[in-house]
Image: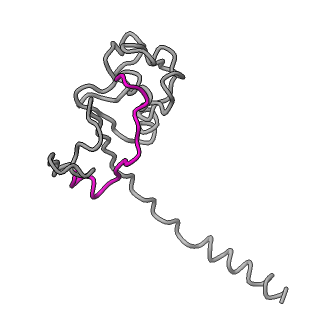
Amino acid sequence: MKKITLLTLPVLLALACSRPAPEPLPSPNILFILADDWSYPFASIYGDTLLRTPNLDRLAKTGVVFTQAYCASPSCTPSRSAILTGKYPHNLGEGVNLVGKLDTAEITYVDLLQKHGYAVGFDRKGWAPGKFEKMGYKENPSGHRQ
């Protein structure tokens, strides 16, 4: 029995090495929608029977819907900083304040996505309010304005 194992091992290794590498899966498209003062359950995808949001419903059926997401802060600047970095606002220094600064040393999901070939953009507010140029950023920490 040991001879069979010893003889089949090189054959299996040769077969495994001769197979072409599988094609990498295509990178998924990511659409992250965030709106000021938009609360649960005010979209029909979340069960609201008065407010109809057919376009959001259509997007949600082919994507991921957050059903247990919570706001890190009741203020927009620290909340958006928390979303960008994945850190609690109280760990972001001045980023915890309304119109505070988000340190350029903080790694954001925008940085990570761009590093992996994604084009990242936003419309309207992005990271705000505040002057991102005064913080050392070349563009809004949320990406390129679209």
Q: Residue visible at 21% across and 50% down? A: 44
Left or right: 6 as drawn, with respect to 45: right
Residue situated in front as seen by the camera: 28 or 98: 98
- Specify start and end residues of the magenta stretch as a single range: 57-76
Front position in the image: 85 or 49: 49
Magenta stretch: includes residue 69: yes
Residue drawn at x 83%, y 90% as measured from the top left: 1
Q: Quadrant of residue 58?
A: bottom left
Q: As drawn, is 54 to the left or to the right of 78?
A: left
Q: Magenta region's main secondary structure?
A: loop
- x, y percentage for residue 110? 41, 33
Residue 45, above or below 103: below
Which quadrant is the C terminus positioned in?
top left
> Which scheme is used to colour this image of the protein?
one colour
Across and down, in percent, residue 30 comes to 34, 46
Q: Position of residue 5 (x, y in %)?
A: 79, 84
Residue extending farthest to the right is 2
* Image spot of residue 61 (x, y percent): 27, 58
Residue drawn at 48 percent across, 18 percent down: 103
